[in-house]
Image (cartoon, rainbow, N blue to C red):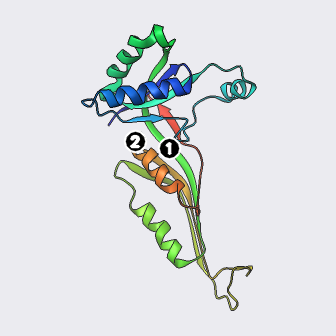
Amino acid sequence: MTYYELVVEGPYLLVKGLFDGAALCNKKNNSEIYFSRDENITRETLKEKLKEWLGVAENLVHVIIDESSVKYWEDVILQVKDNLNLSIISNKKIEDAHFNFQMEAYTEKHGKQMKKLIDNLPKTVKYIDKKVKEEKHDVKDSGIYTPEHPYELLIAGEIIGDPSEIIKTYREWATNSLITLENIELDFAE
């Protein structure tokens, strides 16, 4: 499926409330809606982030929506534009989404779980820049404070693909303390 990033100028809570409310009111529109702020998606350039930290940035809300509902959401924002002081800044087609990760396991049980996560990626998602290091050591004293573990697995790389599936994979992996994730980044069509 194709996705777009709609950038709306206005306070985050107002924009989120508008999207949530309009989605509830229109049961026919089964939009997939993701807010970059909620999904750990890199939203801005360093210059924009610096302005935000200093408190001089504009209120820009980055919303990821599926292609079939772009027109609907543009119409919704146009209808309330004057009353709520909202405007659409940009509408860009997303080519793909990606994030870098690192998995570390020190037991074979956890190692199998990590490998299973990689093996069960959705069909629209790829694992690239693969780095896998698996070692088994003959350790006489094993325990939590031993300098060497009997088993070590390190899997690192990049996950790239369909924005919706990337977000869902990121959400699932973020709950696992053995996985370190970098923010999701979007690549836009020219």
The residue under label 1 is 98
The residue under label 2 is 164
Q: Nearer the viewer, residue 123 or 74?
A: 74
Q: Is residue 190 visible?
A: no
Task: Find residue 166 and report its horizontal and vertical position in percent.
Answer: 44, 46
Task: Find residue 176 and report its horizontal and vertical position in percent.
Answer: 54, 61
Q: Nearer the viewer, residue 145 or 151?
A: 145
Residue most extreme to the top? 82
The circle on residue 149 is none
Residue at the (63%, 84%) spot, across then down: 137
Task: Find residue 19 and report its horizontal and vertical position in percent.
Answer: 42, 27
Q: Nearer the viewer, mark 2 or mark 1?
A: 2
Helix, strand or loop under label 1: strand
Marks 2 & 1, CB-CB < 8 Å contact: no
Helix, strand or loop under label 2: helix
Residue at the (50%, 77%) spot, across then down: 109
